[in-house]
């Protein structure tokens, strides 16, 4: 008799677990959809170029408030000089006044567009 009770109890537990698994899976999918970030909104900041490393593809912009903004870039980054002329990132000098647009992905800021005015003497 006790064997039948143990067997019946074990079957009830297995049945309850198997019925609740799909519900748990659906809840996890719903949470994952909520956690997906919306498309990153471009932010804009202006300041002077404090550091430009073309080998490691990053730069630091010093804002008027003294805030340092580190930005990563690649070959697709649009760089525009005076008169809306396209230039290469290597032609941008330190101290140049720049307005940059960037998006944040995870912990990093990725430069999407930069307009700059060369520093005096360049």
Image (cartoon, grey):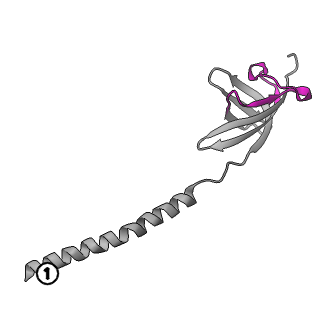
- State the residue at coordinates (46%, 62%): 28
Where is 99 relative to 94, above or below?
Answer: below
- Provide the residue span drawn in magenta: 72-97
In the displayed image of the protein, which residue is found farthest to the right? 83
Q: Residue furthest top?
A: 121
Residue 39 place in picture, x, y as percent: 67, 50
Q: Nearer the viewer, residue 14 or 58?
A: 14
Tell whether position 64 is magenta. no
Residue 77 located within the stretch drawn in magenta:
yes
Task: Quarter of the image for the N terminus: give it.
Answer: bottom left
Placement of the C terminus among the 4 image quadrants: top right
In-image side of 64 versus 24 (left or right): right
Mark 1 falls on what kind of element?
helix
Q: How many marks?
A: 1
According to the picture, the residue beneath numbered tag 1 turns out to be 5
User: 91 above or below 16?
Assistant: above
Residue with the most extreme bottom position: 1
Picture layout, residue 25 above or below residue 79? below
* Residue 15 picture location, percent across and down: 28, 73
């Amino acid at each position: 008799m006790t064997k039948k009770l143990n067997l019946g109890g074990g079957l009830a537990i297995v049945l309850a677990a198997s019925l609740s698994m799909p519900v748990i899976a659906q809840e996890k999918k719903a949470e994952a959809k909520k956690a997906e970030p919306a498309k990153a909104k471009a932010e804009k900041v202006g300041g002077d170029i404090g550091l430009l490393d073309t080998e490691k593809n990053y730069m630091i912009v010093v804002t008027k408030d003294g805030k340092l903004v580190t930005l990563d870039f690649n070959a697709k980054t649009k760089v525009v000089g005076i008169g809306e002329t396209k230039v290469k990132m290597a032609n941008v000098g330190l101290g140049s006044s720049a307005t940059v647009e960037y998006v944040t992905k995870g912990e990093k800021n990725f430069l999407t567009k930069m307009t700059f005015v060369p520093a005096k003497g360049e």
